[in-house]
Image (cartoon, grey):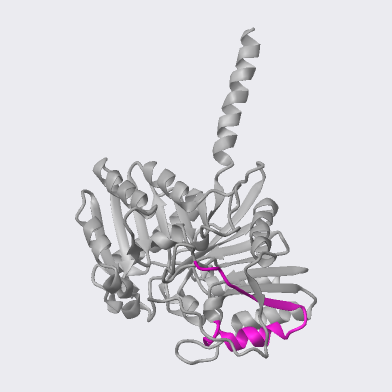
Amino acid sequence: MKNLLFVILTLVSCCCLYGQAASNFEIVESTPIGTILDNPDIRNAHEVWLEMINGAKTSLDIEQFYISPQQGEPLDDVLSAIVEAGKRGVVVRLMVDSRMYKTYPKTADSLGTQKNITMRVIEIAKLAGGIQHAKYFLVDHEEAFVGSQNFDWRALKHIHELGARIRNHDVAQFYQHIFDLDWQLAEKNDPALIPATLHHESNHFPAWTLGAEGDTVWMYPTASPKSLLPDTARWDEPNILELIGSARSEVVLQFLSYSTTGRDKSRYDSLDTALRKAASRGVKVKLIASDWEKGSPGDAPLKSLSQVPNIEVRFSVIPEWSGGYISFARVEHCKYICVDGAAFWLGTSNAEKSYFYTTRNLGVIVKNAKLAGTMKKIFYKSWDGPYMEPVKADVDYKPRKHGE
């Protein structure tokens, strides 16, 4: 009887441990209401963010492009949870981009006055030439959320977004080093301080963790820009190009924007060339870009790419909300690349030069068949859905209104 009890307790213990391990890497989504894009088996960012923030015990480090709430919307719960974390003794550090802070100062300033919360504004424009575009936060130096979701009420309800909750010490520490570097630089925003602040190091990657079926998940965190990386081997661009170069049968990818011309007017064809090379060796390439690219500098390269054998390009056109027009919303904002249904990159960068060379962004490359299969399923739900338009080279596209 004692032996039977021991076996039962052991099984229960193993199940509990397995349950924890099963969530070490979790794909998280946000979808626009009134569309068919929601995946019932994938948790939403609102739920996951609250779970992570409410579970913080000692520290909560948040680096965001900006913070834009609206009364009565889901982001209110998240911001309240951050305040409550500070009240129960969690040390909260909050950082936002300087350019967007000019537009959205109120909430960031208010949070900075709360107990145990310190707020800084980082000027990546001075430090590297671009913006702080990463969207991530870290809990207790052990857990990270990285994804396309801004701290924007629209991101939780009116935009298609993808992110990842990662429970892995090594990966979290890599992102922690990025945050700590930015936090130090944000104190004075003086580029002359970069050499003394940027401590070069080599992390032990890839990292492994357990997946939903108890199998191995291979993870390799990435970031940009190269000039502000503790370990330049983790730079987004070459790792993304290597991922595409490894494709044998299929590359599916989705970005808000796509351009072969940098904001400095220079030619940028690294990603474009990689996709064309993949297609030339027989790989089927499918690309989704948002309809915000219609009539933009990204219009022409998308048309050009659509003419290449083995490459298909479509615009995503999310219908306006039944309740009325919402600025900077009703769009697919995801940023990911999935290769052969076996590996993927998920991040915060758009497919443009500045996001890799002058702007702070984060990402992660993952090799795991089940997770990659989920990413592929998400892609094809959009690709085969009712919101797609094939990009046609002979059409004169007009810009879609999406601003104020």
Percent x, y of residue 312: 71, 77
Give the quarter of the figure containing the N terminus.
Answer: top right
Camera sees residue 129: yes
* Residue 366 highlighted magenta (yes or no): no
As drawn, is 300 to the left or to the right of 116? right
The residue at the far right in this view is 282
Give the quarter of the figure containing the C terminus.
Answer: bottom left
As drawn, is 93 to the left or to the right of 402? left
Instruction: Count up the numbered dots.
Output: 0
Residue at horizontal 45%, vertical 74%?
A: 225
Relative to residue 225, is residue 37 depicted above or below? above
Q: Nearer the viewer, residue 315 or 356?
A: 315
Percent x, y of residue 399: 51, 84
Relative to residue 195, is residue 7 depicted above or below? above
Percent x, y of residue 78: 36, 50
Q: Nearer the viewer, residue 337 or 326?
A: 326
Write down the region rendered in magenta: 294-320
Residue at horizontal 60%, vertical 82%?
A: 270
Percent x, y of residue 333: 52, 68
Camera sees residue 206: no
The residue at the far top in this view is 1
Residue at horizontal 22%, vertical 62%?
A: 109
As drawn, is 72 to the left or to the right of 49? left
Relative to residue 62, is residue 216 depicted above or below? above
Relative to residue 223, is residue 18 depicted above or below? above
Query: Can you tell which quarter of the image residue 154 is in?
Result: bottom left
Query: Can you tell which quarter of the image residue 259 is in?
Result: bottom right
Residue at horizontal 49%, vertical 76%?
A: 356
* Residue 314 highlighted magenta (yes or no): yes
Query: Can you tell which quarter of the image residue 210 is in?
Result: top right
Q: Nearer the viewer, residue 233 or 365?
A: 365
